[in-house]
Amino acid sequence: MNNQVKRLTVKYNGRIVGYLQELMNKQIGFQYDKDWLDLGFSLSPFSLPLHDKVFISKSEYFNGLFGVFNDSLPDGWGELLVRRMLMKKGISYDKLSGLTRLSLIRDNGLGALTYEPTQASYIDVFKIDLDALAEEVKYILDNNNIHEDFDIVFALGGASGGARPKVHIKHNHEYWIVKFPSSFDPKNIGELEYKANELAKLSHINVNEFKLFPSKKTTGYFGAKRFDRLQNHGRHMISLSSLLETTHKIPNLDYVHLFQVIQKICVDQNDIYEAYKRMCFNVLYPNRDDHGKNFAFIYDEEKKGYKLSPFYDITQTKDKLDHEMTVLGEGRPNKEDLLSIVKEYNLSKKKCNVIIDRICNVISSV
């Protein structure tokens, strides 16, 4: 493994987007390819407009990278697997540069961006036993060393984001993410997340396709179809926090930021009502794990612009003290705070009241 990656080519579904280069002062520069400038789109509308120049990130959070490239890196569970894999080789993840970390990412990472040359290893997994994977996941969580089946779990989950253990699989020729219980989760967490997604769907919120995968040992494993994949093509995706060049690990965003971004970059302004539904659901359910990486935007090639991605990572977190994203500065918002935003953004009061009433009725029916 080469610990000193100095330059990477960034690609989108096989097309060259641009180049990442380590500069003399250890900063990382990004420049779009000239052909991409003519026919492509901005990877990050606020930070990387389609200009022929070298961009240098000023963010303190991403090891010299722009947020959109940091989104390609695993965090939470995926980062734990990468650290274990490197530890096996005697390499410290913390000492790797941003470019070197990107070179470890396979093409099954989130979004559609890939990086060359890659140092990722490829393992074909032909048969998937979810119960066996769950046992291996438990072993990894309970032990600092790695087991003989670690390579399979790493191949399926090393590109993951989020705290919960998960794997990326193909199911009926489609791409899915399947989650397993963490050390702190109840054994029926899969069933609970399935019910949360059902409630959101009944509330007329755009939830991506989901299902409960069967298990012989639990009530099932929650699975979500990947909305960043369309047949065999990736779809460009950027999280809200990375779009704003901040980290989701610090609770420094408000739902106001989400509405402002939608107003500036979304091709369909009805997305603001979709975002309002999600804010209301998170507050009323409650889902307080509503940080900036749990909201994302997808680039729509047909509409030539960004749109709000489907709703995802929907869980109930009653024990969490405050919301990760505040509502007009309020960490424990109520119905009155939800209606205050209606005035702030000149939304239809009638439409928003219908949204709130529907969500309250759905939740109370459980």
Image (tube, rainbow, N blue to C red):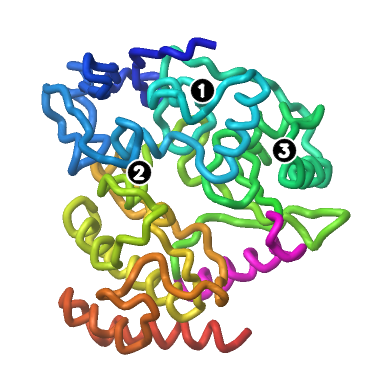
Quadrant for residue 49, please give it: top left
Q: Earlier in the sequence, mark 3 or mark 1?
A: 1
Residue 5 numbered mark, or none: none
Mark 3 vs mark 1, CA separation in Å: 21 Å
- Could you give the CA–CA distance between mark 1 and mark 2, rounded to whole angstroms? 20 Å
In this rendering, does residue 220 appear at all?
yes
Q: Secondary structure at mark 3?
A: loop
The kind of secondary structure element at disc 1 is: loop
Query: Which tag is nearer the camera, tag 1 or tag 2?
Result: 1
Q: Position of residue 160 (x, y in %)?
A: 55, 40
- As for residue 197 lying within the magenta part, the answer is yes
Q: Label 3 belongs to which residue?
A: 144
Relative vertical location of residue 173 with respect to residue 318 in this rendering, above or below = above
Residue behind mark 2: 238
Measuring 31% from the left and 18% from the top, which residue is drawn there?
Answer: 16
Which is closer to the viewer, label 2 or label 3? 3
Magenta span main SS: helix
**Label 2 Cα crowd, 10 Å radius (few <14 / some 14-19 / many 20+):** many
- Disc 3 marks a residue whose amino acid type is Asn
Q: Is residue 283 above or below residue 50?
A: below
Residue picked out by circle 1 = 104
Residue 266 on the magenta segment: no
Q: Position of residue 31 (x, y in %)?
A: 21, 21
Instruction: From the image, state whether disc 3 or disc 1 is nearer to you.
Output: 3
- In the orientation shown, which residue stands out farthest toward the left? 52
- The residue positioned 66% from the left and 51% from the top of the image is 179
Residue range corresponding to the magenta coloring: 182-204
The answer to whether residue 51 is left or right of residue 67 is left
Q: Amino acid at mark 1?
A: Leu
* The quadrant where residue 36 appears: top left
Q: What's the residue type where badge 2 is placed?
A: Ile
